Image (tube, rainbow, N blue to C red):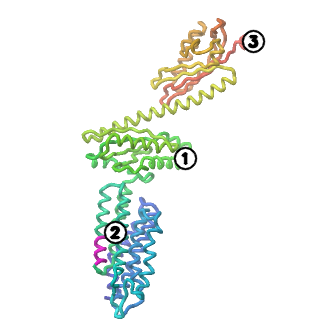
C-alpha cells in the first residue's frame, strides 16, 4: 500500500479534526483556555495519525528502518499523552500534571531502547514484530489500559455534579471506546487510534457545548432555562425547593462597579456549592436570584444544608435571604411559590434588622454629641406599619427638666406631651405628627415651646428631630434633641 492510499485511509480523521478546528473559532461559550487546550489535542491527534501512516508504510518493507524503530514507541506514548491532554481540557489534570506524566516519562527510555535491549519488543532483520517472553511483553498494553482507566475516571469525576443525561452519554461513549481499544491492543491487532481519538474529542466537544449552554456564564451554575426544564423533568425526584436572593447587589454595583458586583455573585455561588452536596441542583435564575432543587432529600437534610450555606456566607461580606418549601404530591410549582414567599419574608426581616442597626449607630453618635453639648436626646421606634413601638428619653434630658430616672419620667410619649404649655401643645403636636406623616422625607421636626419642669417652672426649649425611614417610606426611627433656650428668650434673642 503506497503513502497516498495510507493517507486516504485516514481522511475521516482529518475531516473531523479540520471541522472541529473551524468550529472552535466560532465558539462563544467555551473559555479561551478550553479552546486552546482542545486545539492542542487536535494537533496531537493529527501528529499521531501522520506518524501512524509512516509506521504502517515502514512495516511493509522487508527490513527494519529507523522510522519504524523510533516512531512505533512514539505513537504508543502519544496515546496516553492524548488522553492526558483531553483530561486537561476539563482541568482535572492541571494540579496533578507531573504525577500523571510520570509513567510516560519512565516508559520512554524503556520503549525507545527496547530494539537493542529486547526488554519489551524488537524488530527482526526481516522487519517482523517480536515480543519478549516475560510479562513485560504486555507493557504497552498495560500503559494504554492505565491511562484509559484514568481517562474514564477523570470524566466520571468531572460530570459527577452535572446532569445525569450528559454524564451517562459521554461515559458510555468513552467506556465503550476504551474497552474496544484495549481489546485491540491486548490481541495485538494493529490499528490506528487517531480516528477513535478524533471521534471521542468530537463527542466531548459536543458534551461541553451542551453543558455550557445549560450554564450561567458568570457563576457556572445551571441557568434559568435549565431551571424550568428540570422543574418538569425532575418533578418525581424534587423533594424540596429553596429560593435564595442576594441582598444589596445594586449598592455594590453602584458604589464599587460592576466588576465588584460580578465578584460578589461568583462568591455567593461558591458559598452555595462549596460543600458538594449530592442530589442538589443550584441555579442562577436572575441577576441576584438563585434557586435550589433538592432531589430525594429530607427536610432535616435541607435545613442542615441551608445552615451550612449561611455559615459559608458569614465568612464573606455578602448576605443572602433564604426560603425553602418541601414538595408535596409532586407539586413543584406550588413549592417554588411558597419558597419565594418565605425568602421575601426573610429578606424583609434582614433589611429591617440592618436598618435598625444603622439607626442605632446614628443614635449613639447623636447621643455623644448631646452629651458634649449639654443637650437632651429623644428617640422613638416604629413597626413595619408605621405604629410607634417604643419611646426613649435620654438621661441628659431628664436631668435638664429635674427628673432622676425612668421611674420619675417613664419612657412614654405622654411623659413629655402632658408637660407642654397649653398655648403651645396643639402646634407642637401637629408639627410632630406632620413630620411622621410626610412620607417624602423632606420635612424635619423643628419647634420652640414651653415645658413645665419638675420644680413647676416653665422653661423654653428648642427641639429638632429627624425621621429615618424604610425603603417604602414608613417610619423606622425618630430621633432628635432638646436645647434649653430660656436664657436666650429672656434676653430677647
Magenta span: predominant SS is helix
**Range shown magenta:** 178-186
182 falls in the magenta region: yes
| Residue 416 appears in the figure | no
Mark 1, residue position: 257
Q: Between disc 1 and disc 2, whose residue precedes? A: 2
Q: Residues within 10 Å of mark 2 (few under 14, many from 20)?
A: some
When the figure is inspected, residue 419 is found, relative to residue 37, above or below; the finding is above
Mark 3, residue position: 491
| Residue 41 appears in the figure | yes
Q: Between disc 2 and disc 3, whose residue precedes? A: 2
Residue at 39% across, 79% down: 75
* The C terminus sits in image quarter: top right
Q: Secondary structure at mark 3?
A: loop
Q: Say which of 199 and 181 sits in front.
A: 181
Residue at 54% across, 27% down: 468
Q: Is residue 171 left or right of residue 387?
A: left
Q: Say which of 313 and 303 sits in front.
A: 303
Spatial separation of the CA atoms under disc 1 and disc 2: 43 Å
Spatial separation of the CA atoms under disc 1 and disc 3: 55 Å
Q: Secondary structure at mark 1?
A: loop
Q: Between disc 1 and disc 3, whose residue precedes? A: 1
The reply to whether the C-beta atoms of the residues labelled 1 and 2 are less than 8 Å apart is: no
Q: Say which of 300 and 73 sits in front.
A: 300
Mark 2, residue position: 200
**Whole-percent x and y of residue 403?**
63, 12
**Whole-percent x and y of residue 205?**
37, 64
Q: Say which of 327 and 441 sits in front.
A: 327
Residue at 31% across, 79% down: 191
Amino acid at each position: 500500500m503506497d503513502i497516498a492510499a495510507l493517507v486516504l485511509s485516514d481522511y475521516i480523521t482529518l475531516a473531523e479534526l479540520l471541522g472541529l478546528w473551524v468550529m472552535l473559532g466560532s465558539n462563544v461559550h467555551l473559555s479561551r483556555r478550553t479552546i486552546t487546550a482542545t486545539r492542542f489535542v487536535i494537533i496531537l491527534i493529527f501528529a499521531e495519525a501522520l506518524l501512524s501512516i509512516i509506521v504502517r508504510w515502514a512495516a511493509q518493507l522487508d527490513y527494519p528502518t529507523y522510522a519504524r524503530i523510533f516512531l512505533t514507541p512514539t505513537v504508543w506514548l502519544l496515546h496516553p499523552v492524548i488522553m492526558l491532554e483531553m483530561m486537561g481540557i476539563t482541568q482535572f489534570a492541571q494540579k496533578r500534571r507531573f504525577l500523571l506524566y510520570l509513567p510516560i516519562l519512565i516508559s520512554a527510555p524503556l520503549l525507545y531502547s527496547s530494539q537493542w535491549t529486547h526488554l519489551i519488543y524488537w524488530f527482526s532483520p526481516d522487519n517482523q514484530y517480536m515480543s519478549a517472553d516475560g510479562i513485560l511483553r504486555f507493557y504497552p498494553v498495560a500503559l494504554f489500559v492505565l491511562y484509559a482507566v484514568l481517562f474514564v475516571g477523570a470524566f466520571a469525576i468531572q460530570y459527577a455534579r452535572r446532569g445525569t443525561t450528559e454524564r451517562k452519554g459521554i461515559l458510555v461513549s468513552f467506556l465503550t471506546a476504551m474497552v474496544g481499544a484495549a481489546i485491540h491492543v491486548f490481541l495485538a491487532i494493529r490499528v490506528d487510534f487517531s480516528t477513535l481519538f478524533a471521534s471521542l474529542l468530537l463527542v466531548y466537544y459536543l458534551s461541553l457545548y451542551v453543558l455550557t449552554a445549560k450554564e450561567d456564564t458568570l457563576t457556572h451554575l445551571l441557568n434559568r432555562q435549565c431551571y424550568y426544564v428540570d422543574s418538569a423533568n425532575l418533578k418525581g425526584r424534587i423533594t424540596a425547593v429553596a429560593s435564595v436572593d442576594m441582598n444589596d447587589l445594586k449598592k455594590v454595583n453602584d458604589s464599587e462597579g460592576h466588576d465588584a458586583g460580578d465578584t460578589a455573585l461568583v462568591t455567593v455561588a461558591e458559598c452555595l456549592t462549596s460543600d458538594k452536596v449530592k442530589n442538589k441542583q443550584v441555579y442562577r435564575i436572575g441577576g441576584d436570584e438563585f434557586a435550589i432543587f433538592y432531589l430525594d432529600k429530607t427536610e432535616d437534610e435541607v435545613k442542615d444544608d441551608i445552615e451550612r450555606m449561611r455559615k459559608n456566607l458569614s465568612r464573606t461580606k455578602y448576605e443572602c435571604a433564604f426560603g425553602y418549601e418541601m414538595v408535596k404530591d409532586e407539586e413543584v410549582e406550588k413549592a417554588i411559590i411558597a419558597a419565594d414567599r418565605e425568602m421575601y419574608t426573610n429578606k424583609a426581616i434582614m433589611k429591617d434588622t440592618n436598618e435598625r442597626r444603622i439607626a442605632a449607630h446614628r443614635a449613639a453618635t447623636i447621643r455623644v454629641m448631646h452629651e458634649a453639648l449639654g443637650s437632651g436626646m429623644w428617640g422613638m421606634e416604629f413597626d413595619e406599619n408605621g405604629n410607634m413601638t417604643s419611646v426613649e428619653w435620654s438621661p441628659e434630658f431628664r436631668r435638664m427638666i429635674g427628673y432622676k430616672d425612668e421611674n420619675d419620667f417613664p419612657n412614654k410619649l405622654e411623659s413629655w406631651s402632658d408637660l407642654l404649655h397649653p398655648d403651645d401643645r396643639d402646634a407642637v403636636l401637629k408639627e410632630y405628627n406632620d413630620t411622621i406623616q410626610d412620607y417624602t422625607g423632606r420635612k424635619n421636626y423643628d419647634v420652640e415651646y414651653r415645658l413645665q419642669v419638675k420644680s413647676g417652672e416653665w422653661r423654653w426649649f428648642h427641639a429638632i428631630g429627624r425621621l429615618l425611614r424604610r425603603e417604602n417610606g414608613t417610619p423606622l426611627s425618630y430621633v432628635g434633641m432638646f436645647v434649653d433656650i430660656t436664657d436666650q428668650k429672656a434676653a430677647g434673642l
